[in-house]
């Protein structure tokens, strides 16, 4: 959602804060700001726009060696300079940056105003600065501890006071906050990408914890003000993984990275000796796994689409009933948790509020919930009963691509593991393993079509509406293709089961509404061809994604994209690639900001 950075050390804070905010810009980027203490007062610089716009107004004469910074994705209050963070108290003595939503800010604001506080912005966050200030009596850490229990909602905050220029105080409740421990310097940030250039030693704060930092020490306490010993963890990522590596955008880099990211998801998990999968971290015994009678997958967005594919995999490969549900729906439907049911929450960021709150509701009902996440140490990963990391590497572009195919990889592995415990023979298990092992190479072949797909993007990027159609295990891929096109090119797109088009959506078809059909070489191929002909009969333009060698479809479709032949259950890996590339190139054609599309954030940590 929003990006937060704090620094205490010996180097110029303003430069470190600006660089850290640049790396967090994918989290939210409608306005930004920073605050540093100079000559016993706080200097705050903030404005609408991108980090580069903020850099222009920050003097390079600043010498402060501590400070806080923020890049915003607006939730309360318009995008204005005043509403940008940091927010200060009345006297400008104290400043705070905040990620999250304060649900009781109106009540707090009214009380503070009645006590004489005057507000400059229309945000919920500003109330935090005034509230902490109302408790300040020479000790910032104490004031934060006294103020934060009154806050209802979610927050990750870092604050600074002009009377304690070498100290920062951070607090976390529902929004991530991580400490970076360097040599004679300490960092605070919303996520590790902001600190990775300086240190790989990090400490993850838990909800309710407060941390007080100076250049050479940090102190963590729990809500009861008891000291908490925190483990220093080592980040496994390299800096270049969060750089573009020669690609024009992070999204293009991440699309083309998929052969390798799938390999990483599979690495060490293929048990060829027993023709099964090895998944450490499930925290379930073989007996407990054998007792599972149904699986429910909970997620949002692209992760939900991966979960939908997972339902086909689990039911086909392991013959276990499986459903997928939207996190936001699960949380508020008073879910019925049955015995012998295993829940998976899928989340690339591991911080999505809808999924985190669904997880917490399920755990309140004593459900067994496993997390499939990408970000190690993320909140969802830590609050799950166990789980599997997808090891996709940092996914920086807001539009999720490589995480999707890595999530599929893990879902395949789990389906194989459960299938082999049940009805799959050794030979059948070995076959599934073989299909998985060849997938990175097949995905690489699908990527080879990029020039042709780019030409189609040039041809079709003028469309105002688009339909994506698939059946069976590729129906969720059609949904994913529509989401990709919508979120990065801003072209309206809808995904449907191809059979469903005749039950209404075909009314949309005319010569200006193209349809993308996913037509793998499987038993539904002829049915999909009938659906295509229904569209062609109404002057609809058709792009067909087909298996290599399928010549017949070329006579029906206006344009064809090919992917390698594979097993029917492997097509989601291959069919999603042209959809990712098509959406990407359409967005480039239209001059969109592909890595940071308008109105979006990489991790939606608010409901
Ligand atoms: C996907 O391209 C979108 N950025 C969005 O739908 C995303 O998948 C969704 O917000 C879930 O994020 P998560 O996987 O980090 O929970």
Image: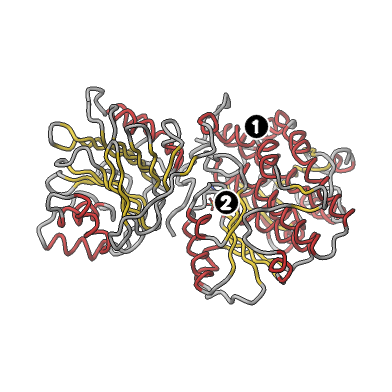
Q: Callout 2: few (<14), some (14-19), or many (20+) C-alpha neighbours within 10 Å?
A: many
Q: Nearer the viewer, mark 1 or mark 2?
A: 2
Identify the residue at image location x=75%, y=57%. 417
Residue 338 picture quarter: bottom right
User: In the shown orientation, is residue 34 left or right of residue 566?
Assistant: left
Residue position for label 1 = 458
Between residue 287 and residue 44, name the one nearer to us: 287
Residue 499 to residue 248: above or below: below
Read off the residue under disc 2: 373
Q: Where is residue 428, by image quadrant? A: bottom right
Percent position of residue 218, x then y: 31, 44
Horizontal and vertical percent position of residue 2: 39, 46
Q: Is residue 140 above or below residue 342?
A: above
Name the colouring of the figure: secondary structure
**Residue 74: x %, y % from top left:** 36, 49
Nearest the eye: 536 or 59 = 59
Position of 564 compared to 362: left or right? right
């Amino acid at each position: 959602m929003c990006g937060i950075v704090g620094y205490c050390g010996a180097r110029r804070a303003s430069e470190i804060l600006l660089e850290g905010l640049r790396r967090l810009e994918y989290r939210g980027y409608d306005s930004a700001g920073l605050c540093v203490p100079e000559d016993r007062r706080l200097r705050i610089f903030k404005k609408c726009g991108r980090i580069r716009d903020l850099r222009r107004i920050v003097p390079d004469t600043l010498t402060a060696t501590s400070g806080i910074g923020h890049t915003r994705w607006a939730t309360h209050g318009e995008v204005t300079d005043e509403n940008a963070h940091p927010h200060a108290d009345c006297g400008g003595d104290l400043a705070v940056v905040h990620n999250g939503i304060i649900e009781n800010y109106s009540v707090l604001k009214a009380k503070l105003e009645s006590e004489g506080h005057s507000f400059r912005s229309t945000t919920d966050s500003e109330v935090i600065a005034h509230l902490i200030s109302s408790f300040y009596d020479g000790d910032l850490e104490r004031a934060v501890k006294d103020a934060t229990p009154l806050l209802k909602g979610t927050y990750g905050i870092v604050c600074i006071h002009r009377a304690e220029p070498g100290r920062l105080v951070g607090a976390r409740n529902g929004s991530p906050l991580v400490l970076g421990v360097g040599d004679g310097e300490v960092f605070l940030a919303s996520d590790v990408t902001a600190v990775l250039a300086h240190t790989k030693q990090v400490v993850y704060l838990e909800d309710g914890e407060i941390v007080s930092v100076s250049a050479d020490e940090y102190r963590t306490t729990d809500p009861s003000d008891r000291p908490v010993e925190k483990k220093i963890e080592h980040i496994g990522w390299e800096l270049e993984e969060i750089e573009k590596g020669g690609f024009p955008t992070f999204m293009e880099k991440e699309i083309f990275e998929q052969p390798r990211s799938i390999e990483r998801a599979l690495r060490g998990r293929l048990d060829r000796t027993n023709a099964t999968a090895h998944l450490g971290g499930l925290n379930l015994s073989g007996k407990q796994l054998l007792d599972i009678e149904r699986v429910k997958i909970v997620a949002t967005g692209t992760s939900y689409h991966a979960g939908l594919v997972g339902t086909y995999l689990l039911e086909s490969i392991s013959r276990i009933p499986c459903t997928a549900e939207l996190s936001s729906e699960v949380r508020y439907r008073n879910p019925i948790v049955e015995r012998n049911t295993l829940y998976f929450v899928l989340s690339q960021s591991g911080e999505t509020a809808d999924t985190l709150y669904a997880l917490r509701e399920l755990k309140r009902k004593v459900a067994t919930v496993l997390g499939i996440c990408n970000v190690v140490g993320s909140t969802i990963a830590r609050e799950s009963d166990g789980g599997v990391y997808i090891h996709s590497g940092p996914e920086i572009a807001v539009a999720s691509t490589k995480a999707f195919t890595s999530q599929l990889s893990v879902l395949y592995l789990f389906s194989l593991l459960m299938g082999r415990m049940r009805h799959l023979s050794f030979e059948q298990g070995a076959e599934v393993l073989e299909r998985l092992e060849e997938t990175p190479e097949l995905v690489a072949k699908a990527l080879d079509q990029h020039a042709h797909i780019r030409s189609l993007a040039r041809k079709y990027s003028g469309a105002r509406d688009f339909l994506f159609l698939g059946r069976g295990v590729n129906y969720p891929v059609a949904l994913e293709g529509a989401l990709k096109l919508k979120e990065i090119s801003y072209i309206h797109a809808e995904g449907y089961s191809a059979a469903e088009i005749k039950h209404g959506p075909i009314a949309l078809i005319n010569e200006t509404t193209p349809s993308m059909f996913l037509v793998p070489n499987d038993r539904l191929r002829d049915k999909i061809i009938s659906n295509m002909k229904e569209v062609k009969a109404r002057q609809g333009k058709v792009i067909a994604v087909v298996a290599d060698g399928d010549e017949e479809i070329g006579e029906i479709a206006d344009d064809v994209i090919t992917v390698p032949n594979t097993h029917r259950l492997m097509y989601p890996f291959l069919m999603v690639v042209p959809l990712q590339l098509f959406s990407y190139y359409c967005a480039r054609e239209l001059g969109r900001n592909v890595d940071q599309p308008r109105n979006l954030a990489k991790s939606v940590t608010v409901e």
